[in-house]
Amino acid sequence: MNKKYLLIIAFLSLALIASLFLVLKTTIFVKKASNSNQSTVVLENSYIFVSPLQAKADNKEKMRLTVFILDGRGLGVPNQIVDLSTSVKISITEVQKNTDESGKAVFDLSSNIPGQFNITAKTQSGTLPQQVKVVFY
């Protein structure tokens, strides 16, 4: 009888180890989602924002504008060149014009002319439908 119980325990232990191995294999060892530049840009998922929304028109105070270029799953698309369109009255400093692994591009804005301006972002895939409005006072 003891041999029968030992055999059952050994079988159950082996089954437990095999189950744990399969769980670990599927959760840890499986290749994670990749962000290759072969991802397709989805302009409707991409977005642009700026902070702060207002700054002094002294060409010293700056606004940080960030653009995220995303794919259909909401993952960043790297190596995309982002260009901004706005009034010639705004100075644009390209901090990071090409998107990084998270799909982020960064720009600084300044102006010495007061006013309210719209800014749009575009890539080789097209223009983002969203735009931001900034104010220099």
Image: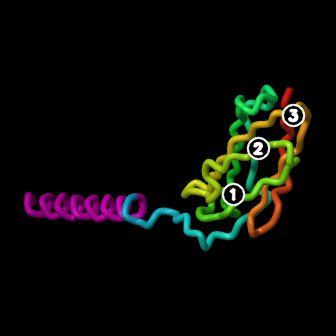
Q: Measured along the vertical axis of the image, is residue 22 above or below residue 38?
A: above
Q: Position of residue 102 (x, y in %)?
A: 58, 54
Q: Position of residue 39 (x, y in %)?
A: 63, 69
Q: Quadrant of the C terminus?
A: top right
Q: In which quarter of the image is the N terminus?
A: bottom left
Residue range corresponding to the magenta coloring: 1-27
Amino acid type of the residue tagged 1 in the rendering: Ile
Q: What residue sits right under mark 2 in the picture?
A: 91
Give the spatial CA distance, label 1 vs label 3. Answer: 30 Å
Residue in view at x 72 percent, y 35 percent: 63
Disc 3 residue crowd, few under 14, some 14–19, many 20+, Cα 10 Å: some
Amino acid type of the residue tagged 2 in the rendering: Ser
Q: What residue sits right under mark 3 in the picture?
A: 113
Q: What residue sits right under mark 1 in the picture?
A: 69
Give the spatial CA distance, label 2 vs label 1. Answer: 22 Å
The question of residue 21 being in magenta is answered with yes
